[in-house]
Image (spheres, rainbow, N blue to C red):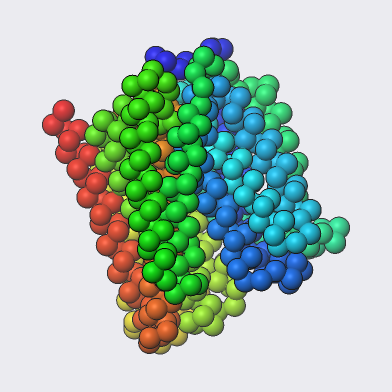
Amino acid sequence: MHQIVTRQIDSSCRWWVLAIVVAAQFMLGVDAFVVNVAIPTIAIDLHATSAEIESVVAIYLIAYATLVVTGGRLGDIHGTKNLFLAGVLGFTLTSLWCGLAQSGLELIIARLAQGATAALMVPQVLAMLHLLFTDEARNRAFAVYGIVLGLAGAAGLLLGGLLLTVDLAGTGWRSVFFINVPCGLVIAAAAWRIMPSTSRRADTKLDIKGSVVLFAGLLCLIGPLLFGHDVGWAPWLWAMMAIGGLILIAFLKLEQAVARAGGMPLIDLALLADAAFMRGLGAVFFFFFANLSFYLVMTLFMQRGLNIPPLAAGMAFIPLAIAFVAASRHSGVRARHRGTKVLLEGCALQIVGLAALAIVSVHAEQPTALALALTMIIFGYGQGLVMAPLSGAVLSTVKPGAAGSASGMYGTTAQIGNAAGVAAIGAVFFAGEALQSARAGFLVSLALFVTFIMICATFLLWTRRAGARS
């Protein structure tokens, strides 16, 4: 065991550690949704251009996705607790900076820094769970993690509207960032006192060249996906994406050279030979491809196609979030007894829910927010069955010494899937809306969601069968 918990921690205390790390994850999830709610107000107050406002959202995602592997590896080198504290405190300070920003450009730079600090923190959450929960409580711990992910989305939508309405001390939209400051300080203080220390590999330096090359490659690959719709998918975008792919190939060659020279590559190359882990990452990519993009398309369809007011459209997701939480609670116990089969059942339920949404949108001339909300419960329950145990299932074959690196690769894969899905399926929706109607774009998007969830299920089934043979 290359990385171990150096200060022993009893079984009851580890649940307090779980509470700390998922609270940090909750803060990040809420932040993402409250920012989306506040974007129109930010644009007016800062006199920001549409490109600047898009960048406020996109730059955070780019920074997070391109640096999370580096954050995971730093956790392996300097210790999970140390990097978690650095990430939480960094996120707290950059949130304060975001709230104090005086221009669109300054807010973009602050959001870039905020995404980078999130990339330091998030891999340590999964790594700590992986290290502390190695017994029968593992599925329960990851179920709690999944529940928090579901609650963060609903809480973010509600909190964003509430903060903008109340206008705390006249701070307006800035309060959506300021609220992270006291939360972050409390989480950091609790982590300092309770979280166990882990072994460090201080004799090994971070692969700086690998970090830079990986950042450049993923930036070239993800950036065009996020901004392609706004520039009409110009030819130079495709060229940039191709360059990004070539850079990533060069990154793998560089990492192999670092390993041959006796250094510590940014990613644990042994993970690339772990067939189960790589199949799991395939499932992760396609699951998240149909994750954030679903919420984007549903919101656009309700507001642009059905003229449902924003508040009512946001409230329509609440039953889905409740179903997600309920499924997350059930999935831990079921995964312990049924394994990957629970994930396959969740994929099947998501497909049923999408089919139900298609039926409602086709046969009802003007579907109400209530009708859509009730229908989305099926999808939400299925999504909860998958998301809660997915991270635990994918990381189950990883050795403790590579927990940080594996968690970073998991986070990067998930965020690339989110970004690619939002860009690709969002573009399909807009194209369908322009050519015919928002309803047409919505139906085509639903078909794509079904397709990618089926591909996710295929990877999961492949993993299940391979495990049965071994």
Viewer-side residue, 439 vs 417 = 417
Answer whether residue 232 is visible to the viewer in this image: yes
| In the rendered image, the vertical position of residue 318 relative to residue 206, given as above or below | below
Viewer-side residue, 187 vs 266 = 266
Location of residue 428 in the rendering, given as x and y in whole percent from the top left corner: 38, 73
Residue lying furthest left: 469
Viewer-side residue, 373 vs 98 = 98
Question: Residue at (42%, 84%) from the top-left corner?
Answer: 434
Tell me the quadrant of the picture where the N terminus can be found: top left
Location of residue 185 in the rendering, given as x and y in whole percent from the top left corner: 73, 36
User: Relative to residue 451, is residue 402 drawn left or right?
Assistant: right
Question: Residue at (28%, 51%) from the top-left corner?
Answer: 456
| The quarter of the displayed image where residue 104 is located | bottom right
| In the rendered image, the vertical position of residue 265 relative to residue 449, given as above or below | above
Question: Residue at (72%, 34%) from the top-left corner?
Answer: 186
Residue lying furthest right: 169
| The quarter of the displayed image where residue 339 is located | top left
Location of residue 231 in the rendering, given as x and y in whole percent from the top left corner: 48, 72
Answer whether residue 12 is visible to the viewer in this image: no
Location of residue 357 in the rendering, given as x and y in whole percent from the top left corner: 36, 71
User: Relative to residue 304, is residue 466 drawn left or right?
Assistant: left
Question: Residue at (37%, 20%) from the top-left corner?
Answer: 261
Viewer-side residue, 427 vs 363 = 427
| In the rendered image, the vertical position of residue 296 relative to residue 89, given as above or below | below
